Amino acid sequence: MKILSFKKNNKNSFGVLNDNGIVDAGPKLNKKYPNLKSILESNKIDLLKKIENDPIDYRIDDVDFLPPIPNAEKIICVGINYLGHIKETGREIPKYPVLFSRFIDSFVGHNEPLVRPRVSSDFDYEGELAVIIGKRAWHVNEASAMEYVAGYSCCNEGSIRDYQFHTIQWMPGKNFFKSGSIGPYITTTEEQNDPSNFYLQTKLNGNILQNAPVSDLCFSIPQLISYCSEWTPLNPGDILITGTPGGVGRVRKPPIWMKPNDEVEVNISGVGILKNTIIDEK
């Protein structure tokens, strides 16, 4: 099942994507469940399954996509977590996951432009797999960690590289307004639940710049969930963004930066295709 959040007629809603289009769950469920996060918190995802094959309310082109969980409480990102990316940056394999956080307003949805800020042109792409937590995970072990996953989405964890490396803390370069994207939807675990079989590809203007199996992760998804749950409760709707493969723009000679009118695409087999264009900050 593919579930999503979207905007229509300036109103936020959520629903299910089937082969024909979008079934709007808002009119059916929002008196009790106002958004996808509330569905996950209440463990009521079966309510969406029941309407999956209802007549559609909208075609895909009729709506504006939002990040799948537009009110996520926690967004935890993993740095330098693909072996190919570790190698190209000249780093040693870390002993523990390298973690940082992003704010939800640093992300846009599928087909919404990414914004290159006025203070920098060092705007880098990072195709990543996003893991959506489905139930509260607190002190969970690796063996049971996948039981806490609701599904997966694509992410372009756009980074402003000069600001990222102003200090040893990465937060500024990772949180510029509307600099990243998540979407187009969440592919639930009943449809895909072995991320080691996923393959990630990032294209810029049609050119393949990142190309790697998710199995190249240094720290696997069960390891990441277990480790994070040691120090914070992971709650339904929280998002774990698992790292980017080799091929980022910063390490290329010369560097490749995203610029206005560029088109960037993150394609994860079995999950979806996330597309965005680039605009300058006004």
Image (tube, rainbow, N blue to C red):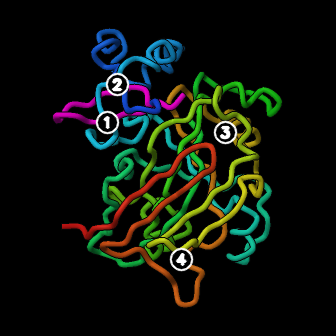
Q: Which residue is mark 2?
A: 56
Q: Which of the 4 quarters of the picture holds residue 79?
A: bottom right
The answer to whether marks 2 and 3 mark residues whose Cβ atoms lie closer than 8 Å is no
Residue 257: % across, % down: 44, 78
Residue 38: % across, % down: 42, 19
Q: Which residue is mark 4?
A: 249
Per the rendered image, the range of residues in magenta is 1-17
SS class of the residue under badge 4? Answer: helix
Q: Amino acid at mark 4?
A: Gly
Q: Amino acid at mark 2?
A: Ile
Q: Which residue is mark 1?
A: 59
Q: Amino acid at mark 1?
A: Arg
Q: Which residue is mark 3?
A: 228
The answer to whether marks 1 and 2 mark residues whose Cβ atoms lie closer than 8 Å is yes
Rendered position, 73 above or below 208 = above
In front of the other: 234 or 277: 277
Q: CA distance from mark 2 to mark 3?
A: 38 Å
